[in-house]
Amino acid sequence: MRKLAVLLLLLILLQACTKTETNYYPAASKSLVIISDNTASSDMIVGIMGAVRSAYPTVHIDFFNSKSFDVYEGSYLLYLTLQNYPSGTYIAGIVEPGAQSKRIIYQANNETILAPDNMLSTRILDAWPGTSCTFVNNPAVLGGSPADSLPVSEFYKRAILSMLSGLPVTSFGSICSNPHAYPVQHPVISGDTVKGEILFTDNFGNCTTNIPKELTADIPVGTLLNCRVDTAHMTITMGLTYSTVPVGENVCFVNGSRRLQLSVNYGNFSARYNASASSKVFLVK
């Protein structure tokens, strides 16, 4: 009897060792990221999320709020999302001052993006040149309704549902051969001048530029620089932190994103110089 019990125990252990490993975590479902200057509690966003969850219960939804009517900062958020989310993510950018733009859909970095054709896609199209875009004007993907007959909230609801269905972007309508975009100033050194532009401003008026740490590495801390932001001229001190300069003075330093930040110690750089996302920056060393 004891031998039989030992034999049964050995068989159980053997079965456990050879059993195929079970994955108790379900495969990742589709992911949707919505970037909008409407709040997450607005009728539009609540309606879109409700429709998506009803049609696709397993879709994971993330929402990011952008500044109102600011397509330049929205463009950076759109690009940042594309750069950091995994392949296969669906992205909807809904920043439309006036809500009169045509809308486009396209694929870049193996992700699908829906956005108005109002320059919101500038940074993605700049980073992935040659990306082909399609206007969303096929009634078949909009519940049988012409695009210009739908309120903006209903348009995005129907377009996003069709996007999540996996339809090829070419089925959404006609080709958009020249999507709207604004000129981008890439970070470069030209002679004694460092050139770049502002990517975004925070709630305190600090302005993060696209100028990487490497382009200012040879400028000693404490150096007083001539700076131009769009048409505003000022002097600014190269520092390590805000406190490099007295209260109220201009300072620039490399922030946590390893990019040059323009600030006022205990002040608001953005308001002082009317600087915002897409403002061009020129620093004379």
Image (cartoon, grey):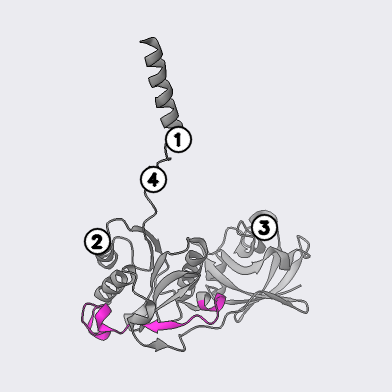
Q: Is residue 127 above or below residue 30?
A: below
Type of amino acid at the residue the image marks with label 1: Thr
Q: Could you give the CA–CA distance between mark 1 and mark 4, rounded to whole angstroms? A: 21 Å
Q: Residues within 10 Å of mark 3 (few under 14, many from 20)?
A: few
Which range of residues does the magenta coloring cover? 125-151
Residues tagged 1 and 3 counted as in contact (Cβ below 8 A): no
Q: How many marks?
A: 4
Q: Could you give the CA–CA distance between mark 2 and mark 3, rounded to whole angstroms? A: 51 Å
Type of amino acid at the residue the image marks with label 2: Gly
Q: Which of disc 3 and disc 4 is earlier in sequence? A: 4
Q: Could you give the CA–CA distance between mark 2 and mark 1, rounded to whole angstroms? A: 45 Å
Q: Which of disc 1 and disc 2 is earlier in sequence? A: 1
Q: Which of disc 3 and disc 1 is earlier in sequence? A: 1
Residue at left offset 46%, top offset 77%: 121
Q: Residues within 10 Å of mark 4 (few under 14, many from 20)?
A: few
* Residue under numbered circle 1: 18
Disc ID at residue 50: 2
Q: Could you give the CA–CA distance between mark 4 and mark 3, rounded to whole angstroms? A: 54 Å
Q: Which of disc 3 and disc 2 is earlier in sequence? A: 2
Q: Closer to the observer: label 2 or label 4?
A: 4
Task: For the N terminus, give its image quadrant.
Answer: top left
Out of 57 and 21, give the one closest to the viewer.
Answer: 21
Residues tagged 2 and 3 counted as in contact (Cβ below 8 A): no
Residue at left offset 48%, top offset 75%: 72
Q: Quadrant of residue 117?
A: bottom left
Residue at left offset 40%, top offset 41%: 22
Disc ID at residue 246: 3
* Numbered disc 3: secondary structure: loop
Disc ID at residue 25: 4
